Amino acid sequence: MSIARRMLQQALKVSGRSASPLIKCLERWVEGVSAAYARRNDTRQVKTLEEMPGPSVMSFAWDLFAKRGLSRLHELQLKGRGQYGPMWKASFGPILTVHVAEPELIEQVLRQEGQHPMRSDLSSWKDYRQLRGHGYGLLTAEGEEWQSVRSLLGKHMLRPKAVEAYDGTLNAVVTDLIAKLKLRSQQNPQSIVNDIAGEFYRFGLEGISSVLFESRIGCLDPVVPAETEQFIQSINTMFVMTLLTMAMPRWLHQLFPKPWDTFCRCWDYMFQFAKGHIDERLKEEAEKIARGEEVEGRYLTYFLSRAGMPMKSVYSNVTELLLAGVDTISSTLSWSLYELSRHPEIQDSLRQEVLGILSGRQIATAADVGRMPLMKAVVKEILRLYPVIPANARVISTRDIQVGGYLIPKNTLITLCHYATSRDPAHFPNPDVFVPQRWLTRNDGHHPYASVPFGVGKRSCIGRRIAELELYLAIARILVQFDVKPEPEAHVVRPMTRTLLVPESEINLQFIER
Ligand code: HEM
């Protein structure tokens, strides 16, 4: 309470007068004056971007390009925080970005993100769509357009009941994954499956396709269709090229056209792949209707097309959902089995938890995995150590905001460094060690924004519930069917950034049938 206000109240008490309209008016005036005074004082203390520490343009460019910094961006978060504190600025090619690496400050940014949060307005993904005249999907759309797709998809992807209904579809894909792992481990004298991330890539694509189209596309067949392999290859290359094309000023695209051309070719293929599958599925439906048969789909493409969304938006949304469901699942599942293979005691406890809930059954349902606290803790811990999207971003386009005592002008790109916060010993003791148990105790003391692998708020991951269900179902069945061990003389695998955080080298594991 301001001193002026207190004095006014004191005066009222002394005079014994009740609060008449005049007095109330006076009170409001005093409040207004003191708020304005506080604001002026605040602005005086607020620092500007010029005062923010950070590497020079040259030294950051050196780190990025000469020292393979693009693949070590996650480590540069730790280096930046160590060198400059919780906030620093750096120029990523032509883009100035403010890095924020403290949970309270990340929270401050997200609480000011406004009605239609924006991740980045400088994305080369958007440039590509404009160039080719494609629509935007949920990942790239903004404003009202984003809001309307988000509300529509939210009904089918965020509501627990709607997501639980996908467990049968996803379990059918898990059945094929298990058969494939059995086949591959039987082909090796030591039951080793090489490059599990590659296998889980196909699993991820088959999983999200079945949710989108309610039909299978053969990713886990003994011979994978060539177009599927090319789609996966296109995603890989597109992610490698994303950071490069964003870090290069546009005029450099003319001088060195290869990265931009390759990037566009990958997207062309991905859009073509998605369109092919959508058209095929909708044609089947039209034929059914022509034969007078009932059409009742439980798949996302059906919901989108039935909601009257223009086909251009259906194509772009499905392309982006297909893309979002591949690396995210593959990487998280690979790291889960990697860590469980190195911590046999935790693997065993988790298996006991699964077997206890299944009581004799082989296949878990959504309701079953909902009752597995250790399973949830394992996945949380994996995403703390290896958040597949290691940094998030926001651009607040409507107004300047204050964060950590700095004034951030509107339209500044803000990088939320949650890889750094989730590896911070101040929030997680022994931060580099896999300890799922830390998630089992309430009030373990970490800030709620210290590990936010799915983001927070209106623009957070819409696929979170589907991803978690798919991961739980897959891990549960793998542990029931196999003992998972590291290959003999296995080396440590580290993460690397390829826009997303992925294993730097192959993860090879022994899958010993139980
Ligand atoms: C372990 C798995 C996954 C992780 C860690 C993850 C993480 C994230 C993160 C960090 C964001 C950005 C959130 C923000 O800006 O605040 C995001 C957005 C998004 N994710 Fe995921 N994701 C995962 C799986 C999936 C899956 C399986 C799908 C598709 C079914 C998906 C679809 C999306 C979409 C469409 C967006 C954009 C949402 C929007 O802009 O409104 N994600 N995800």
Image (tube, rainbow, N blue to C red):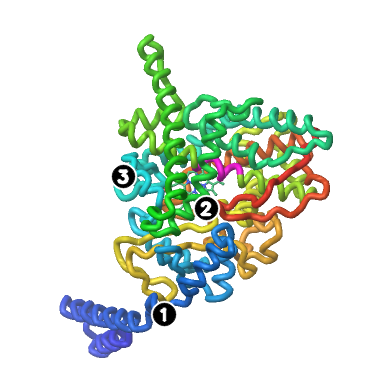
* Count of numbered labels shown in the rendering: 3
| Mark 1, other Cα within 10 Å: few <14 / some 14–19 / many ≥20 | few
**Quadrant of the image for the C terminus?**
top right
Q: Which residue is mark 3?
A: 145
Hey, what amino acid is under mark 2?
Thr
Q: Which residue is mark 2?
A: 499
Q: Earlier in the sequence, mark 3 or mark 2?
A: 3
Q: Is residue 155 magenta?
A: no
Q: Around disc 3, counting alpha carbons within 10 Å, would you say few (fewer than 14), some (14 to 19), or many (20 or more)?
A: some
> Up-down: is 332 above or below 474?
below
For image coordinates 45% across by 35% down, the residue present is 269
The reply to whether residue 374 is visible in this rendering is: no
Percent position of residue 397, x then y: 32, 61
Foreground mark, 2 or 1, reads 2
Q: Does 453 sit above or below residue 29?
A: above
* Residue picked out by circle 1: 51
Q: Earlier in the sequence, mark 2 or mark 1?
A: 1
Q: Amino acid at mark 1?
A: Glu
* 164 sits to left or right of 51: right
Percent x, y for residue 398? 29, 61
The residue at the point 44 percent across, 74 percent down is 404
